[in-house]
Amino acid sequence: MYELTSRLSQHPVLCLSPHTDDLAYSMGGLIAAMHAKTSLSSVNVFCTSIWAPNIEAKGPETISSIRREEDLIFCGKYRITAAYWETPDSGCRGYDKVTELSTAPELDPVWPDVAHRIAGLLRTSMYHIIFAPLALGGHVDHQIVRDAILRSRLRRQLTVFYEDVPYCSRLNLMQIERIVSTYVPSAIPVRIAIDIDQKLEDMRLYFSQTRQEDLDAACIHAQRRGSPNGFSEQFWILEDSAA
Ligand SMILES: [Zn+2]
């Protein structure tokens, strides 16, 4: 099995997050396990948001600020240096729950600008390892980040994709394999054992967002990726960057 954890302890890591909660949801177990041994930074791409199902607050300014505060608590806990781009998320761009999961990223008006900005970030980056969403479930914001990475990644950077919680729990493992073979056909799977209770506790830090169904989704997926008695997160490493 590819020694991802030893690579993480040797090089600075940049995690690209479509929304502020994606890292805790999709790779929070790995972050909790590895934060003391590596240097972590994040870029949150779509930070202007109106998505906060658990609270009464309204309007993009208030909600975006609450979401950022939640993320800063998570990042403070794990010493992650975070950056926030003001790009409006899918809800602010007029998508609904159906269209945000069924629209091709290149048809979205923000695609050229985000792709250009991510290309510039990678080109000037000192990071050796890049984490990005696989966009399981097809959320348009996640697809934009994934496709921008695939288009502009550098071979000297190890590129690792995470499985998107909660969306991935709506897919069976064969459907996930099919998406992997479409977008990252030669990627190497790597599983990391995680502390699921710690992960759920960290997901709850995003109190404006996290619903019981999200916690359940994280559990279901980590269980089917885990060993009989344990929980895991699975990652996909691009083969040509894995040497
Ligand atoms: Zn997201």
Image (spheres, rainbow, N blue to C red):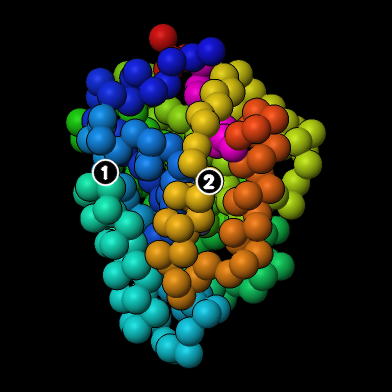
**In this picture, which residue range is highlighted in magenta?**
231-239
**What's the magenta bit mostly, secondary-structure-wise?**
strand
Instruction: Based on the picture, tell me whether residue 236 belongs to the magenta stretch.
Output: yes
The picture quadrant where one finds residue 66 is: bottom left
- Whether pointer 2 and pointer 1 mark residues with C-beta atoms closer than 8 Å, the reply is no
Instruction: From the image, state whether disc 2 or disc 1 is nearer to you.
Output: 2
How packed mark 2 is, by other alpha carbons closer than 10 Å (few <14, some 14-19, many 20 or more), is many
Relative vertical location of residue 97 with respect to residue 182 in this rendering, above or below = below
**What number is the disc on residue 200?**
none
Q: CA distance from mark 2 to mark 1?
A: 22 Å
Residue at numbered disc 1 = 41
- Name the residue nearer the viewer: 171 or 37: 37
The picture quadrant where one finds residue 174 is: top right
- Name the residue nearer the viewer: 241 or 81: 81
Residue drawn at the location 65% of the way across and 32% of the way down:
229
How packed mark 1 is, by other alpha carbons closer than 10 Å (few <14, some 14-19, many 20 or more), is some
The answer to whether one can see residue 14 in this image is yes
Three-letter code, disc 2: Ile
Instruction: Work out whether mark 2 precedes mark 1 in sequence or the reverse, and give the earlier one.
Output: 1
- Name the residue nearer the viewer: 125 or 162: 162
114 displayed left or right of 54 = left
171 displayed left or right of 34 = right
Please state the horizontal and vertical placement of residue 103, each as a whole percent of the image: 66, 58
Residue drawn at the location 42% of the way across and 56% of the way down:
202
Cβ of mark 2 under 8 A from ligand 1: no
Quadrant containing the C terminus is top left
Residue drawn at the location 69% of the way across and 30% of the way down:
228
Three-letter code, disc 1: Ser
- Name the residue nearer the viewer: 239 or 36: 36
233 displayed left or right of 14 = right
Please state the horizontal and vertical placement of residue 160, each as a whole percent of the image: 46, 30
Residue at numbered disc 2 = 196
